[in-house]
Image (tube, rainbow, N blue to C red):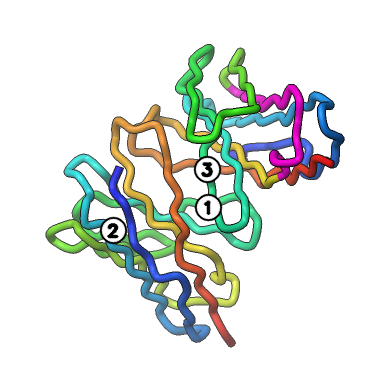
Amino acid sequence: EAQVTQNPRYLITVTGKKLTVTCSQNMNHEYMSWYRQDPGLGLRQIYYSMNVEVTDKGDVPEGYKVSRKEKRNFPLILESPSPNQTSLYFCASSSATGGVAEAFFGQGTRLTVV
Amino acid sequence: DAKTTQPTSMDCAEGRAANLPCNHSTISGNEYVYWYRQIHSQGPQYIIHGLKNNETNEMASLIITEDRKSSTLILPHATLRDTAVYYCIPRSTGGFKTIFGAGTRLFVKA
């Protein structure tokens, strides 16, 4: 089954404790991206990757890092989480780099930073 | 990227057609119109996309006006499970971003 898998689904952590949210897709997609969703602000793009070793900033990249060492994985790293990063996070992938292709989304990671 | 205008919310009776409009008057020639939906807090789900011709798949139909300044997503027989936020998103073939607006919250009522 084609899918995008995020882990963990739920995470509560403390300010300043580094964490990684993993994202993996099994569709051999070139393009992957991360979004955060906050009430009243909708879905905003954090980072995206056009292919292995190629990443770029989205609209709200501050406080986040990403890496793309393998095609299937695109982890989101919070080096020093702060309470304003409490949010619902989604990973997405698609087959064409900016081309006409539907995006597949993971089920989300709800992060709470206290 | 083109800006979109969608109704904040809409109601639809179960079994009836749900028609969700979207205005994208600044859409450029190479931008497709995509529709996604998000049920509660799940990941967004792709529904359909089109450039200038009307499109239909197993989930919905997409009607795009001839001038491409607006479109309508049609769910032919809405069910309670179609209650969700529906996003209309213009996206170019050369763009890397999918920009989500506020969308339309559709309530399907029994």
The answer for how far apart the CA atoms under marks 1 and 2 are is 17 Å
Query: How many badges with numbers are in the image?
Result: 3
Q: How crowded is mark 2: few (under 14 residues within 10 Å), some or many (20 or more)?
A: some
When the figure is inspected, residue B73 is found, relative to residue A53, above or below; the finding is: below
Magenta stretch prevailing secondary structure:
loop
The answer for how far apart the CA atoms under marks 1 and 3 are is 16 Å
Q: What residue sits right under mark 1 in the picture? A: B45
Q: What residue sits right under mark 2 in the picture? A: B55
Q: Does the magenta portion include B33?
A: no
Where is residue B88 shown, x and y percent of the image?
A: 38, 56
Q: For numbered disc 1, what is the local secondary structure?
A: strand
Which chain's residue wears label 2?
Answer: B
Which mark is in front, 1 or 3? Answer: 3
Q: What residue sits right under mark 3 in the picture? A: A44
Q: For numbered disc 3, what is the local secondary structure?
A: strand
Where is residue B54 shown, x and y percent of the image?
A: 24, 60
Which mark is in front, 3 or 2? Answer: 3
> Residue drawn 52% across and 52% down?
B45
When the figure is inspected, residue A104 is found, relative to residue B101, above or below; the finding is: above
Q: Do labels 1 and 2 share a chain?
A: yes
Q: Does the magenta portion include A79?
A: yes
The amino acid on which the numbered mark 2 sits, given as a three-letter code, is Glu
Q: Is residue B36 left or right of residue B84?
A: left
The answer for how far apart the CA atoms under marks 3 and 2 are is 28 Å
The amino acid on which the numbered mark 3 sits, given as a three-letter code, is Arg
Quarter of the rendering occupied by the C terminus of chain B:
bottom right
